[in-house]
Amino acid sequence: MATTWAAYEPVKLPDSSRRWSVTLTTRGEFDDNIDTSASNERSSWKGIVEPQLQVNAPFDQTFVGFRYQYRAVYFERRESEPVDQEHLADLTLAHTVNPRLQLDLREQLRRGVEPELVEEQSGDQFIRQRQGDYLYSSLNGGLSYNLSQRWTTSVLGGWDLWDYDRADSSINDRDVYRGTVAVNYGLDRRTTAGVGYQFYHVAYDVPGTNDQRNSDSHIVYLSGVRRFNPQLSGQTNVGLELREFGDGANDLGPWVDASLTYNYGPQSAATLGFRYSITTTEVGTFRSADSADIYGQITHRVTAKILVSGTATLSLDSFSNPVGPVGDDSFTEEIFSLAVAARYQFTRWLSGDVRYNFDQVTSDFTGRDFVRNRVSIGCRLVY
């Protein structure tokens, strides 16, 4: 008889009788623009290998989780540095102090060596070739406390680190510190409303004259969550963001994060969302951009063995706050990405899939335009 576990485990493994799992994913892919270049595109067949180890340690009130993944991409038609590598490590700690007080900590570490892929914080499917090796670390923590049956308060904090190896990329090395305080009130069993404040501090290793690239952001917002029925739910955060730069310049704009989710069947759901904020850039002399993202996601369970999914994202960036003369301060960039996949579950431990990815960038910056198509087939072993 398989062992059963009655413990606190927010992150589940494929086999509930185990505390660890090993996964191996192999993939063959054709990429028609491996350099994400605007002209003289190079295509190549690629071989991708992704082994992963995941360990869960659940207890009555505490959960500790660890995940490590190695990714290697071999390019058939790239003589210089034919292999890209990436190391990913996640550490999660969740502790229920008492029924009213919850503590959560998470560390994400990414190390790219001639990296092709970078995990974007927004979760978008857009992929760009990074310029050289880099280290990315994100540490997040939070406390949530139920003041009463209806009132809940939370305090969140985080630290992000971007560190590039190349000397000519070190201008973008930076630390980002952030904090959030939020209070929510349950209007009824289906509706929650709240108010929150977020603070961001961006500190560059090379901030420029008068700390002109460093900045502080203040965001005040109202939030709401509504479960219309068992299938349909929505959430929205709407407010204002003020970003102040070290040299006295500032930028004021709306801050929005809203989505609508419809669960229309077992393992079948559709989501439509919109985000708008002032973002930090790594483009030329511009320090920020007003960014709008529209995205849609769908997952559909066709049969017990077949699952199909799709994601589409449109991002519009309007760059602002230059640190020097640029001639024209109306530079914009449009990014569209599409990803569709179909997976077949042969057995409990073996599955196969086919994928198609499309990326397109239309930019006012010279050399940043590109179109990219990728088609792949892969298999996944889980133990």
Image: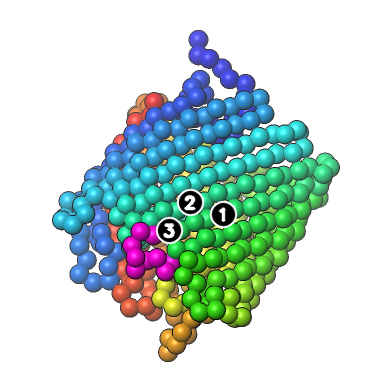
Magenta stretch contains residue 236: no
Badge 1 element:
strand
Residue at numbered disc 3: 163
- Determine crowd level at label 1: few under 14, some 14-19, many 20+ residues with C-alpha closer than 10 A: some
319 or 106, which is in the foreground? 106
Q: How far apart are marks 1 and 2 (CA)?
A: 8 Å
Residue at 18 percent of width and 57 percent of height: 80
Say which label, 2 or 3, has the lower sequence index.
Answer: 2
Residue 16 percent location from the top left of the image: 52, 24
Task: Quickly name the residue at label 2.
Answer: 137
Q: What residue is rendered at 62% in x and 21% in y?
A: 6
Decide whether the magenta segment is chiefly helix, strand or loop: helix
Q: What residue type is labelled 2?
A: Ser
Marks 1 and 2 in Cβ contact (< 8 Å):
yes
Disc on res. 159: 1
Which range of residues does the magenta coloring cover?
Answer: 163-172
Q: How far apart are marks 1 and 3 (CA)?
A: 13 Å
Which element carries disc 3, helix, strand or loop?
Answer: strand
Left or right of residue 105, residue 318 in this image: left
* Residue 380 picture location, percent across and down: 34, 34
